[in-house]
């Protein structure tokens, strides 16, 4: 074991000892909202994550699948007694960060604020959840911006591909098909009344869960959650009528033109569910392929370092409530798209036939440990990590369990999984770029 590996091992042992000292507890507020409480004495901030379950794009009628995204962007167009400008100014004055987002499954709010101004900031957070004003002119402006953005492939090709184009291909005839955006035409038909009806149905305490992390006690956290949801209707839990689905992959390559000398290439691979025993082998396999984002990953080492075909590239695991897959992305010149795709298929074939090596296995195990050490140093990162794992059905011991089970994975298990789930002739490709219309 070299000096770097020894450092990683000892650093991780120190981190995991610290994590064990951190207090984790399932709790419930007086208003009935369940939440994970994480006491972090080293933090000067309080972080709150809230999910309104089964409120995402897949849980709406197809012609209103863009409503959750629209809501997440319009919700801060005035709240309570604040105009949009006043609300933004008040948040800035308190150094409070409040955001809202939506995906195919759920609607989320995030909140981070210094403990010294927690009381004042909570009033703002409560107003955003309880009484958004939806200033008509500002809402219309946001609606136009979203519709334009969805149609502009060059603005952010990665986000457009993953949130809209790819779902329409790999989840065809399923509720995930519309992605997070829906069609621009349907989006433009949505109204302020749609936003209000959406709020009445989904933004209720019976449909909410939360995570609170910071240097506060459990009693203070309970009071905090009660204050956040003060005046919010109890309502009913939203039904989950979305079926489990496996991505449908094929050998097609679809091209979408955008101006410029560069192209973005996107692709999809299969993976295992987070609760599957094979998920740990999948994490190692895709770490070596490109999820670790190191130059030892094969996508960068083969496609960039050795052959100069791409500027950047990697893969990311995406876990929806009812589907799991791996998204990949390559950035290259228009003239090198086909060469990059061909070599990527060779890499995937080599994974399938020959697997990874023992040295690669040990490297990626240490890399995952080191990434956990670096990535979970702050209370905000802790809150995000455990909140997201909670939504996947994993408990507060998930970090220690994951690291142990990662350590236990054998080379044979990783290579067997590669042979089972990888197929270079069954990969769906999307190309957004120039060169031909």
Image (cartoon, rainbow, N blue to C red):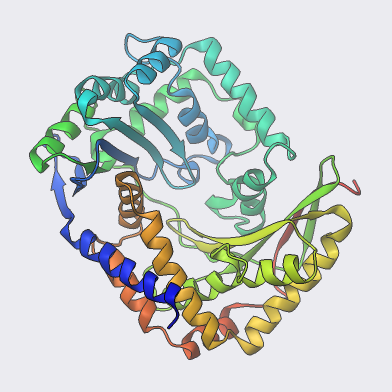
Q: Is residue 377 above or below residue 356?
A: above
Which residue sits at x=31%, y=76%?
A: 404
Front residue of this view, candidates 245 and 215: 215
Q: Which residue lies at the image location 64% right of the left edge and 84% below the top edge?
A: 352
Residue at the far right: name it.
Answer: 436
Q: Position of residue 235 (x, y in %)?
A: 25, 33
Q: Is residue 277 visible?
A: yes
- Give residue 322's position: percent from left, percent from top: 45, 59
Tell me if residue 360 comes above or below residue 135 in the rendering: below
Question: Which x, y percent locates residue 325?
Answer: 54, 64
Outermost residue on the front side: it is 3
> In this rendering, would 134 be left or right of 398?
right
Q: Is residue 279 above or below residue 256?
A: below
Which image quarter: residue 46? top left
User: In the picture, residue 214 is in which quadrant?
Assistant: top left
Q: Is residue 280 left or right of residue 336?
A: left
* Observer able to see residue 272: no
Residue 382: percent from left, percent from top: 31, 51
**Looking at the image, is 78 positioned above or below residue 295?**
above
Quadrant where the image shows the N terminus: bottom left
Q: Residue at x 62, y 61 (%)?
A: 314
């Amino acid at each position: 074991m070299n000096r770097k590996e020894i450092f990683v091992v000892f650093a991780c042992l120190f981190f995991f000892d610290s994590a064990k000292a951190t207090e984790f507890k399932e709790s419930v507020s007086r208003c009935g909202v369940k939440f994970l409480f994480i006491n972090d004495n080293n933090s000067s901030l309080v972080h709150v994550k809230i999910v309104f379950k089964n409120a995402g794009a897949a849980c709406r009628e197809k012609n209103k699948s863009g409503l959750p995204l629209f809501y997440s962007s319009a919700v801060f167009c005035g709240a309570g007694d604040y105009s949009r400008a006043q609300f933004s100014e008040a948040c800035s004055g308190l150094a409070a960060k409040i955001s809202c987002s939506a995906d195919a499954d759920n609607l989320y709010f995030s909140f981070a604020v210094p403990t010294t101004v927690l009381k004042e900031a909570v009033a703002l957070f409560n107003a955003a959840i309880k009484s958004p004003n939806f200033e008509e002119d500002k809402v219309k402006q946001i609606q136009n911006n979203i519709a334009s953005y969805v149609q502009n492939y060059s603005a952010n090709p990665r986000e457009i591909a993953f949130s809209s184009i790819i779902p329409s291909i790999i989840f065809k005839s399923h509720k995930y098909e519309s992605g997070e955006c829906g069609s621009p035409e349907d989006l433009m038909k949505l109204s302020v009344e749609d936003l209000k009806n959406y709020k009445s149905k989904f933004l209720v305490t019976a449909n909410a869960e939360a995570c609170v992390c910071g240097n506060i006690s459990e009693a203070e956290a309970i009071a905090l959650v009660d204050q956040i949801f003060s005046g919010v209707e109890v309502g009913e839990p939203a039904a989950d009528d979305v079926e489990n689905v496996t991505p449908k992959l094929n050998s097609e390559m679809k091209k979408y033109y955008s101006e410029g000398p560069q192209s973005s290439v996107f692709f999809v691979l299969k993976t295992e569910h987070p609760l599957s025993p094979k998920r740990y082998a999948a994490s190692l396999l895709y770490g070596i392929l490109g999820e670790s984002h190191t130059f030892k990953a094969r996508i960068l080492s083969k496609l960039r370092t050795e052959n100069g075909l791409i500027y950047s590239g990697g893969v990311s695991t995406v876990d929806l409530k009812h589907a799991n897959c791996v998204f990949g992305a390559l950035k290259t010149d228009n003239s090198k798209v086909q060469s990059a795709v061909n070599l990527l298929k060779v890499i995937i074939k080599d994974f399938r036939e020959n697997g990874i090596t023992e040295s690669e296995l040990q490297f990626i195990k240490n890399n995952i440990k080191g990434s956990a050490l670096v990535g979970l140093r702050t209370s905000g990162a802790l809150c995000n990590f455990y909140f997201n794992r909670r939504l996947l059905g994993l408990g507060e011991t998930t970090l220690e369990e994951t690291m142990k089970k990662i350590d236990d994975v054998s080379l044979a298990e990783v290579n067997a999984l590669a042979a089972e789930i990888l197929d270079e002739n069954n990969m769906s490709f999307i190309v957004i770029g120039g060169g031909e219309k």
